[in-house]
Amino acid sequence: MTALFNTEWPWYLAGPLIGLFVPALLLAGNKVFGISGNLRHLCSAIIPGKVEFFRYDWKGAGLWNLVFLVGVLIGGFLASHIGTPHAIAISAETRASLSGLGIHDFSSVAPRELFTWHALLTLRGFISVVVGGFLVGFGTAYAAGCTSGHAISGLANLELPSLIAVLGFFAGGLAATYFILPFVIGSL
């Protein structure tokens, strides 16, 4: 069991497994893959009837997706507590660029200079976490789905809106990486 968590899976195994997920969902009742809809399902379960947007049969529409979300959380917990820690693979050029912006912690995926309670109370931390989180949530709602839903399910179904959304996600990510992130992290 721990062998599953001690090394990353090779692309030739992980890729086809992700690819097979879409036809499996279609065979299971024309379901669509995505994580972002879970927030709506959770809100509908917790505050039913208070907001019109959350008035729907969340058990029929999203119970399977909530089970999937629980599996993701359990998998992440198992990987972080059972698996062998690996160094974060970041190129020397990226480390140098981030060091120039004041990021020196490469011990985890989330640098402590940005993602701690103390850092959250700074302007840089607030913009990174709160404003960034709001923009991600807004973009997900505006695009009617998240990157995983559009890129995996939408593109597999040959949906033009998903192609446009994925292109927008990548363009936004590149713009944020080269223009916004250096300003927010380096200037504040």
Image (cartoon, rainbow, N blue to C red):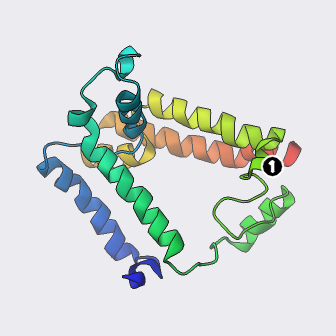
**Residue 68, position in %: x, y?**
32, 52
Q: Please determine whether, in this image, residue 60 is positioned above or below residue 153.
A: above
**Residue 184, position in %: x, y?**
79, 42
- Tell me the element at label 1: helix
Q: Quadrant of the N terminus?
A: bottom left
Task: Using residue 168 as the reference point, say whether residue 92 is left or right of it.
Answer: right
Task: Using residue 177 as the reference point, say whether residue 22 is left or right of it.
Answer: left
Residue type highlighted by circle 1: His
**Residue 138, position in %: x, y?**
53, 29
Q: Residue at x 79, y 48 (%)?
A: 119
Q: Please determine whether, in this image, residue 171 is positioned above or below residue 141.
A: below
Q: Please determine whether, in this image, residue 31 is positioned above or below residue 114.
A: above
Q: Quadrant of the C terminus?
A: top right
Q: Nearer the viewer, residue 35 or 177?
A: 35
Q: Residues within 10 Å of mark 1 (few under 14, many from 20)?
A: few
Q: Please determine whether, in this image, residue 82 is positioned above or below residue 22.
A: below
Q: Which residue bears the numbered disc 1?
A: 118
**Residue 148, position in %: x, y?**
40, 49
Q: Nearer the viewer, residue 184 or 116?
A: 116
Quarter of the rendering containing residue 17: bottom left
